[in-house]
Amino acid sequence: MARATDRGTRRDGDAASAHELTASERAARRMAERERTERRTAEREALKQTAARKRARGERRRGADAAPKSAGSTTAAGAERAGAVPVVELRDVSMVYDSGVVGLERASIRLARGEFVFLVGPTGCGKSTCVRLLLHEVEPAEGQIMISGHDLADMPRRKVPHLRRNIGTVFQDFKLLPNRTIYANVAYSLEVIGEGRASIRRKVPDILRLVGLSTKLHAYPDELSGGEQQRVSIARAFVNHPPLLLADEPTGNLDPETSIGIMQLLYRINRTGTTVIVATHDREMVDKMRRRVIELREGRVIRDQASGLYRPLDESTSEFGVRLRGELGVGVEGHPN
């Protein structure tokens, strides 16, 4: 009887030891996860502090209206690679907004002349932040942004309008002037850069013919469909034939058939030698066009693929299930969301 009691006691002790070992493993995992979270938080805090210092330096520079650096200093990198200067280059760029939200984190992108590139990813991943950085609307906390070999950090504020004249921009909401005709909307982008009247009279009809709106010169924006308004927006962006064209969700408000026409137009512009960057959620269009795809997630570049798809085909079974449920509007348990 005593021996049976001893054996039972030993079994209880072994079970307790196994339980304690499992608990210690769980504690170790929790500690490791906590350390990873703290490390990531510390990195983001460092980015915020760097961004604050950079904003302060920018304000001092603007206050002093610093003179531009010599052409030799701003294009030194381009001189080293004569004939192969990328149109756009981001080198380990991080961007933190005043609210503390991280827009980009150590993103590096290099685009050659004449490329057609899709920026894809979920809302808030950093696509629009890339567009704003290239337009010099915001400044990075860290890293370097080069446009045709010129470092934007060396560009004084008074030179920013000149930069934007060489970048065409197409927005999801068109941003047309409602009280001006289609002709006047396109002509306005030439007037603000001092283009002569004779040149405007020649260029505006030509670009409207290119986008298929030669018969709508005297119409107003509210008399056009959404697709036609977007064509006007593209005509305005390209009328000066810029080397770089940025399109931020250009088909976001359009039906599939109209979207195809808009993408065909952007492709036609790209064929003239203009580098085109399209930030989009339009998975079907990305998959059909098979151009270079750069995928962003939480501000980081997680994929850069030539002739890519919106999502790579080598997704795991669980990733496929999550995506399919999301596309079908079905919850985890098989019920509609």
Image (cartoon, rainbow, N blue to C red):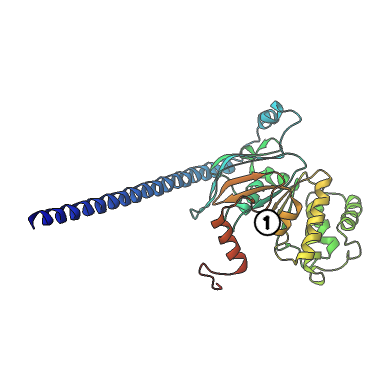
Query: In percent of the image, x 59 and y 69: which residue is there?
Result: 329
The image position of residue 158, as x and y in percent, is 67, 44
Q: Quadrant of the C terminus?
A: bottom right
Answer left or right for 268 relative to 158: right
Query: In percent of the image, x 57 and y 42: which residue is there?
Result: 93
Query: In percent of the image, x 54 and y 70: which residue is there?
Result: 334
Q: Nearer the viewer, residue 310 or 176?
A: 310
Q: Considering only vertical position in the picture, is 113 above or below 208?
A: above
Q: Nearer the viewer, residue 144 or 255?
A: 255
The image position of residue 63, as x and y in percent, is 57, 43
Q: Quadrant of the N terminus?
A: bottom left
Q: In the rendered structure, which amino acid carries the disc numbered 1?
A: Thr
Which residue is at the far left? 2
The image position of residue 209, as x and y in percent, is 90, 57
Answer left or right for 190 relative to 98: right
Q: Considering only vertical position in the picture, is 21 above or below 208?
A: above
List the residue tagged with mark 1. Answer: 280
Q: Nearer the viewer, residue 70 or 128?
A: 128
**Quarter of the image where one finds residue 150:** top right
The image position of residue 99, as x and y in percent, is 49, 55
Task: Specify whether residue 80 is in view.
Answer: yes
Task: Specify whether residue 239 is in view.
Answer: no
